Amino acid sequence: MKTAKLIAILVLCLAPLAANATPSTQIWIPSTDVQKYKSVHLNVDNYVSSEKETAGNWKAPLLVIGPTVGVLPYEKVKAEVGFDLMRAGVAADSDPLYLHAKIGTPEGAAFAGSPAFALGGYNFGTKKDVTDQNIIYGLAAKNVGKLGRFSAGYYSGNDKVLVDENGDKENTGVLLSWDRTISEVSDKLWAAVDYQGGDSAQGALSFGLAWAFTPDTSVIFGYDVYNNDKIAGANTYTVQLDINLW
């Protein structure tokens, strides 16, 4: 089984598709979910433009691939670390490494009825004021019966990199999301909507569906509407493969 998974990964890496250095996420923004101890998760995220840019050209597709590993052996406090390699058809591809980490507590861990909490960071690039978005965030999430899970939080990043089309800083904003397993149809079907505030390239409204093909393999099919197309470019379709290797 592991051999088959690795072959699938290699095929995807060679495909001519090509999003964010990703901790455990919803569609675009982080979630309060944290990988369990010693688990190794692989994400292969593709973002492809839905239309041509204003100038008539197509924005290059974006590929992010990398592992996330659970590193804390506790039930009420969990942590994960990971890295991604990003390719977007731009000059920053020469510095493709981005790091991410998160610590969090599940619902009910802090006190009876408490929401889940997470504190983390992502898009820690290696080239100063070019790839080092250095986004730090905090999130809280709560399941509300059949309505699903609601999350809210805030982020702040490098104001030299997270800017608008005029170079003005757009490095802070809200993080909001809703997600739910659509069990009325199938326990394998999941839906989500998320939003990241700000007019940098990170600001976006995203929505999509995921299907779990096996307990360890799922694929998200989504769409991203960017807050500021002058800096982020055209809206994108996204296909995200998630595999628990072990």
Image (spheres, rainbow, N blue to C red):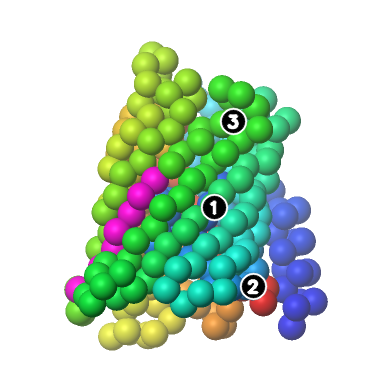
Query: Which residue occupies 30% across, 37% down?
Result: 173
Residue stretch in magenta: 137-144
Query: Which residue occupies 26% across, 54% down?
Result: 152
Identify residue for label 2: 38
Q: Is residue 122 visible?
A: yes
Q: Give the Cα separation between the discs numbered 2 and 1.
A: 15 Å
* Whole-percent x, y for residue 75 in the image: 46, 77
Looking at the image, residue 42 sits to the left or right of residue 194; the answer is right
Identify residue for label 3: 131
Classify mark 2: helix, strand or loop. Answer: loop
Q: Please name the amino acid that badge 2 sits on.
A: Lys
Instruction: Kindly report the secondary structure that dominates the magenta region of the rendered protein.
Output: strand
Q: Which image quarter: residue 104?
A: bottom left
The first of marks 3 and 2 along the sequence is 2
* Whole-percent x, y for residue 11 in the image: 75, 61
Q: Is residue 231 visible?
A: no
* Whole-percent x, y for residue 230 in the image: 39, 24
Q: Please name the amino acid that badge 3 sits on.
A: Thr
Looking at the image, residue 12 sits to the left or right of residue 34; the answer is right
Looking at the image, residue 131 sits to the left or right of residue 14; the answer is left
